[in-house]
């Protein structure tokens, strides 16, 4: 996916605070995570890189807000983005 497609997805989704996104990749299994709009967001976005906290580290991130728990992914590897449905 290109920068514009990813940014449009993030802008048009009315995601609740902390709601996860399912990120399907072209060549690997999908992950669930949270896009982080931190201090380097604009710099990474310009290069189509995105800082994402995966579901396995999400609880720790929500407590500490430690950006080191996030990983950087290349947007060109993304195939599709969808909002994770809330479990009732």
Image (cartoon, rainbow, N blue to C red):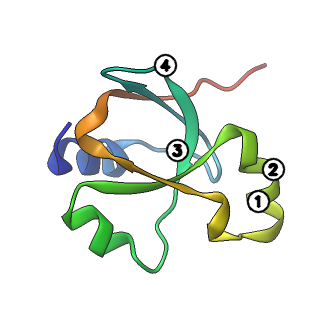
Would you call the spot at circle 4 few (<14 residues within 10 Å), some (14-19), or many (20 or more)? few
**Residue 43 placed where, x, y %?**
28, 74
Report the mark closest to the observer, 3 or 4. Answer: 4
| Tags 1 and 2 touching, CB below 8 Å | yes
Rendering quarter of residue 68: bottom right
Q: Separation of disc 1 and disc 2 at Cα?
A: 5 Å
Badge 1 marks a residue whose secondary structure is: helix
Q: Do the numbered discs 2 and 3 sit on residues whose CB atoms are within 8 Å? A: no
Among the two numbered marks 3 and 1 on one chain, the one whose residue lies closer to the N terminus:
3
| Secondary element at tag 3 | loop
The numbered disc on residue 62 is 1
The numbered mark, 1 or 4, whose residue comes first in the sequence reads 4
- Residue at 81% over, 50% down: 59
- Label 2 residue SS: helix
Can you give x and y, in whole percent of width and height, for residue 80 in the image?
32, 25
Mark linked to residue 15 = 3
Mark 1 touching mark 4, by CB under 8 A? no
The nearer-to-camera label among 1 and 4 is: 4
Tell me: residue 26, above or below residue 21: above
First reached walking from the N terminus: tag 2 or tag 4: 4
Which residue is tagged 2? 59
The residue that mark 4 highlights is: 29
């Amino acid at each position: 996916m290109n920068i514009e497609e990813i940014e449009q997805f993030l802008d048009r989704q009315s995601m609740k605070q902390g709601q996860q996104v399912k990120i399907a990749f072209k060549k690997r299994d999908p992950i669930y995570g949270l896009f982080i709009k931190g201090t380097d967001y604009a710099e990474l976005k310009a290069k189509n890189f995105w800082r994402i906290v995966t579901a396995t580290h999400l609880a720790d991130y929500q407590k500490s807000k430690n950006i080191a728990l996030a990983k950087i992914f290349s947007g060109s590897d993304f195939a599709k983005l969808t909002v994770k449905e809330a479990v009732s």
